[in-house]
Amino acid sequence: MDLKLSCVLVVLAFCASQTIAQKKTTVTGDLTKNRDIGTRVDLGISHQRKKWGFDGSAFGTSRGHRGGSLGISHKRKNFEFGGSVFGDNRGNRGAKVGFKWKFGKRSTAWNGEHFEVRVIVNHCDFNVYDINEDSVITVDEIYELFPQRTDAHRLFKALDSTSVDGKVTIDEFQMMAPQVIKKCGYNKYTY
């Protein structure tokens, strides 16, 4: 492991030790090993402070691939927004910004219904997760869908638990999704 990755891991560990006593902090760590990527180390930390959420993660492999992400979110009474940046040493870089608005009272004269608007997808459909349509789900595709990197990585690891090869095929997804994704069963959905 190179010096830069080691420094990132030490900083994350230090931050974790400083904030772990607060009950709104989650620290995750993972060590995996397989033929394709070698040994991979993942560390993440998430913290909630009042209306703010902070998320950071870093990874590194024994074959020199390393990267990380930082995210922030803020919740108000009827509005939530957030953003994240990510990158790795292979030139993959990006940023995401998102928001959610709950429709409600616009003035004191409104006495009608209040609505929460959400986009709903079939969370048991393999194609929702296979963004590039190459018939496998990678951890990067899971990261595209979920802003909390630590939760996204835990989901990917659970789905990839049968082969642990860094990708989830449709057969693996059909076998593992009902076990790890709530309300996901074959009797309701077809693949």
Image (cartoon, rainbow, N blue to C red):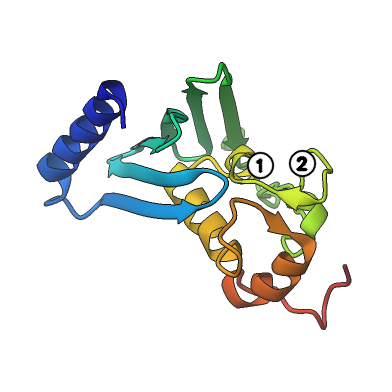
35, 48: nearer the viewer = 35
Task: Give the residue type at disc 2.
Answer: Ile
Task: Give the residue type at disc 1.
Answer: Glu
Q: Is residue 190 above or below residue 6?
A: below
| Residue sitting farthest toward the right | 190
Please provide percent x and percent y for residue 79.
53, 35
Give me the residue at 42% from left, 45% from top. Answer: 40
The quadrant of the rendering that contains the N terminus is top left
Residue at image mark 2: 131
Disc 2 is placed on an element classified as: loop
Give me the residue at 52% from left, 43% from top. Answer: 37
Please provide percent x and percent y for residue 57.
38, 37
Sequence-first disc among 1 and 2: 2
Disc 1 is placed on an element classified as: helix
The quadrant of the rendering that contains the C terminus is bottom right
67, 22: nearer the viewer = 67
The answer to whether mark 1 and mark 2 are in CB contact below 8 A is yes
Please provide percent x and percent y for residue 88.
49, 23
| Residue sitting farthest toward the front | 35
84, 157: nearer the viewer = 157
Give me the residue at 59% from left, 61% from top. Answer: 160
Residue at image mark 1: 141
